[in-house]
Image (tube, rainbow, N blue to C red):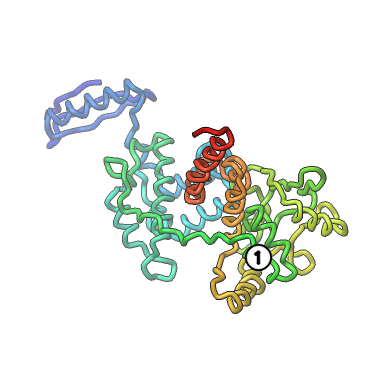
Amino acid sequence: MAINKLSSGVKRWEVDWTTADNVRRRKRFSTKREAEDFWHATVRSVQSGTYIDPRAAAKVTVEQLYEDWIERVATLGANGRKPASPKTIDNYERCYENYVAPRWGHTPIGKVRYDDVAAWITTLKGRDGGPAGVTTRREVGLYFGRLMGHAVKKRLLATNPTKDPLGQTDYVPARVKEREHVYLTMPQLMALAKACDEFELFVMVAGTCGLRWGEITALTYEDLDLVDKPAMTVRKAFSEIGGRLVLGPTKGGESRVVPLPALVAERLKVASAAESPGARIFGGARKSVLRNSTWTRRHYSPAIGRLKATMTNFPRPTFHDLRHTAVSLAISSGANIKVVQRIAGHASATMTLDTYAGLFDHDLHDSAGRLNAALERLGWE
């Protein structure tokens, strides 16, 4: 590498260097100080192996980066450990087509600037032309950040242009606070199940086993083990992709075994007697796949309405609240955190604790009470 003084021109100081790929580069500066600063920084980056040729970013558009990134996500996953689910891929594709491509598709990634990204997300328009909602702006902002992060991993950019010098993305709205979970008591769950008529067993399985909608509607009789210790293996789940129901892996990509209450297992055993092992346990007419919105409108909401007409304090749980109910009932029955984790299908016990921490609060006093009872039995005074 060298710094040369040219005989003419506005920028008379030129840095001449060779990249790690053995490519010769030159860059001119107005002052010797600017040239020396650039020279020192470039020498350090080349020697440390962190040098990134700025010309590379000028040759790749956001659209080209997206095509490479979405292929990686589909085959290896964003973290390189496992492929993303079809539903995740569909969400990414829709986000890119509806929001990212119109604004950034033909832009070279080297020209993406933090201020421009911040202004775009802040003033983002929805598909109807009006201001995009908080959730949409958050999802698009985070998604675009992951996409540009791929450019850093590919060594096309030195830093992620969607983040400020401190690594922050202040323009991305905070997560919208979720509605409070509804936890039914066992009597309330039984009443709701009964009110759902022919779907009584469907609601009882959801409310005691904690399966997600896509998981419970994908269950077949061969997923059941009703012999010694009744349980079900959750292997698959339906996802709605582009208006179509697609059978694929569970949300976490892993199978899990969920224990069944004996009385629920007995009902399932009776139902299985007249069915083939591969038949779906729960379905619509002619065992068609249930759709959440249709089932809720035709069966679930009317059942809740009938209950509230006679029980004014009866809550209005969503179907997903039956999953929360199953966790709540398991905790109140004394299940340990690992059992609850398995029921919920969480990747870790930490995730379970973060989601349901409030349900464990009573354990503080219950634990002290059990210790005190042990002391009393031993006659300690």
Q: How many marks?
A: 1
Residue closer to the observer: 328 or 346 = 328
In the image, is 180 to the left or to the right of 260? left
Q: Name, please, the residue furthest toward the right.
A: 274
- What x and y, as percent, mark residue 40? 22, 24
Depth check, front residue: 336 or 137: 336
Query: Which residue is pictured at 60% across the width and 59% down the height?
Result: 322
- Provide residue 159's location: percent of width, then percent of height: 33, 38
Q: Residue furthest bottom?
A: 309
Q: Nearer the viewer, residue 76 or 22?
A: 76
Can residue 378 be seen in this snapshot? yes
Q: In which quarter of the image is residue 152?
A: top left
Residue drawn at 72 percent across, 65 percent down? 200
Give the side of residue 349 with respect to residue 40, left or right: right
Q: Where is residue 170 in the image (x, y as percent from the top left)?
A: 30, 51
The answer to whether residue 302 is above or below residue 105 is below
Percent coordinates x, y for residue 281 in the rendering = 76, 58
Q: Residue at left 32%, top 20%?
A: 47
- State whether residue 72 appears in this view: no
Question: On the rendered structure, is 211 left or right of 89?
Answer: right
Snapshot quadrant of residue 8 = top left
Residue under pointer 1? 291
The residue under label 1 is which amino acid type?
A: Arg
Label 1, residues with CA under 10 Å away: few <14, some 14-19, many ≥20: some
Q: Which element carries disc 1, helix, strand or loop?
A: loop
Which quadrant is the N terminus positioned in? top left
